[in-house]
Amino acid sequence: MEDKVRIEKDVEVSRRSILRTSALVGAGIGAAQIFGTTPVAALGGTTNATLDKAIKEIVKGKTIKVGFTPPVLSENFTQIESAAWRKMAEFEKRFGVKWVWERQAPVGDFNAVQGTLGIVQSWISRKFDAIAVCTGANFATVQDLYKTANSKGLKVFQFNQPAELYPEDQLQTVANIGYDNRWQSGYLAGKYVAKTLGGKGNILQIWGPSGSDWTRGRRIGFDKALKEHPGIKVLGEADGGYVRDKGFTAAQDLLTKYPNVNAIYGENEEMALGASQAIDAAGLKHWNGKTGIVTIGADGLVSGFKAIAAGKLTATVDIGGIDQGQNLIEAIFADVALGQTLTQIINNPTQVVDKTNYKWHQAYAEWALATPRKYGK
Amino acid sequence: MALNYTKISKNTSLQNRIVQDPSFGIIALLLFAIILMTILEPSFATSGNVTNIVNAMMTVSFLALGMTIVLIAGGLDLSVGSTMAVTAGVAGKFISYGIDMKVAFICALAIGTGIGVINGLLVTKLGIPDFIATLAMLGIGQGVILLWTQGVPILDYMNETYYYIGGLKKIVGPISIPMIVVVVVSIALAIILKRTKFGLNLYAVGSSPFSARNSGVNVDLIKISAYAISGFLAAIAGIHIAGRTTTIPPLIGKGYEISAIAAAVIGGASLLGGKGRVIGALIGALTLTLTRNIINLVGIESSWQAIVTGSVLVGAVLANRASGEFGKKLNRRIRT
């Protein structure tokens, strides 16, 4: 029975991988440079014995030591890591590469940047092959640290980082695996709200902490969507600190002042879910396709998809955490094992997920979380 | 004539008592803010907003009450946020395993109290400074919840009863279970502090542990008990917040220790020990919650929010100090 389930899941994954590759190539964005021009492009569920053998000969059973440091341990980063493990297990089987994986996250919140710097420094001194970083640390500070890492032969990759906000020529990384927070998240959310409300309505916004690069990027995108739809008015905004209880309290306060809103944008899913609770607590109605309050977040978490299914969250922007995890490993493998040159910005597809399409997004995330092998345990 | 003198004397005494009250300054500041907001912001003095404020201050109230007890005894508990997170996790996870809700809550309360006892033992028996011992416990608590959950929030534990416990559903009108629990706990603590030997000993230990020991007070037991109460109340906060947020992210308790300390200090508790009141802790929690509520209603940009909150904290402490000094001067004038 278990085998049957596994086979079904693997089939689903192969189908998804093909979808993912075609979407990337179709979009003509950075990721296509990995999938479209290297042997790793063949990962799209179509294994090729000759190709695998040829890569195996290059890899020669090499061990790649990777350090993975998210800014916090959360559902989003757990999904990214699980997706990375999936890809690592696949490449280990196909190409004979061995992985040593170490995950360390600073204890604290997104602002616990000193912790991240310390972790990266320790990996530099321990001579890791590749470091995967996502941090809320100051751009210049981390670039200096990456420069040190580069001088010692370490390869630095960033993931889920708003690299698009900084000059590309100043990046000291091999590649940045993620998405564009402006046009692939904030803008999409703004457009969705405008479209759902027919271009006219009042909205509230719950943002992450001031100074966060994610907030900055998504705000640029959302503002652009608002400019394109002048009928959408922002009545109020508040800081929800990226967490549910603060998002809940902030939305409650704003709903007291503006009970007649048509939509609430939570910059991340946790805050959007907090806003959803505030709607319930205020005795207001969720969007039912015609009336009620539209709530939209961003992340693409299993808990968010479940909330969409339950009608508690109208939509979310799936920022492609699973693709990020997979792309990260493909990028590390392409550079460290095959010696290929990558583009700096490797963006995965993102999508607004609502009741019409949440099922496959949820299945994809759950597939990643059910990884058959966990590294670094 | 004699009658008039007595009347004046009584009035002066009452006036003096009000002004000399340790929380007079912050109460005056709160009243000023409330009046100002009522005039400027029509949505402020509505029943909906008042209910929101009261519900939002519940978590910090529990923690601030526990922190006040520890501060009175001359200690400091930095672990309340992580204790709250761990106990929220225990309650949520146990219920999701199908364990009876009451058993889950008892386990959470026992673990919270146990963490408090360990804090107390580290401080009294091993001589580790309060700051270090509870800081270590904060780290251990955060580590435990992160290892346990692997960063994935705890879900699927909510049931109808838990919506009431979290205050998301009200029992009568705007009254919720957490409100009743806060009132009951506050009355119980106020009685303990004012009417029991244990309460007097808490103040004595916090004011001067040396003198208290010489007077035959078991200082270690008093301190351990204070930390145990703090852990117990952090567990109540954990059970409550799990119901309020309907999901338990691993970082759920992050930063709450600072809010608890701030609320207790705003309420007149001293970091040097020997001072603190139950009503003060509640006023402190209200001050923090009200500040956030006003910030959101007025629409102060998020960059300014930390500055405003910090300024309110300093202003509140200064207002309390000023009212204390004013009261002393008034007292001297009456005597002369």
Image: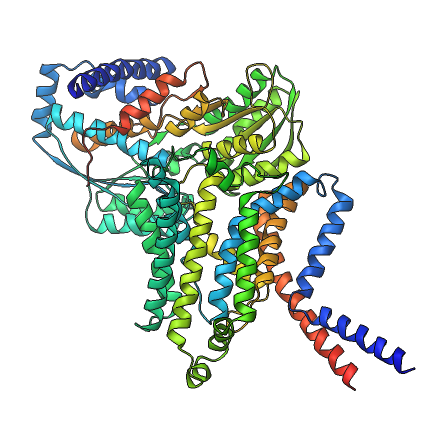
Using residue A312 as the reference point, say whether residue A347 is left or right of it.
left
Q: Quadrant of residue A58?
A: top left
Q: Is residue A250 above or below residue B33?
A: above
- The total number of labels drawn is 0
Residue A102: % across, % down: 22, 42
Using residue A304 as the reference point, say whether residue A4 is left or right of it.
left
Residue B84: % across, % down: 42, 51
- Nearer to the camera, A254 or A189: A254
Using residue B69 as the reference point, say whether residue B54 is left or right of it.
right
Residue A289: % across, % down: 55, 14
**Residue B57 visible in rendering:** no
Using residue B46 as the reference point, say whether residue A88 is left or right of it.
left
Q: Residue at x 45, y 28 (%)?
A: A298
Q: Quadrant of the N terminus of chain A?
A: top left
Residue B63: % across, % down: 49, 55
Q: Quadrant of the C terminus of chain A?
A: top left
Q: Quadrant of residue A202?
A: top right
Picture colour scheme: rainbow
Q: Residue at x 65, y 67 (%)?
A: B320
Q: Quadrant of residue B229?
A: bottom left
Q: Residue at x 25, y 51 (%)?
A: A122
- Nearer to the camera, A149 or B193: B193
**Residue B188 visible in rendering:** yes
- Nearer to the camera, A46 or A274: A274
Residue farthest to the right, as pictured: B1
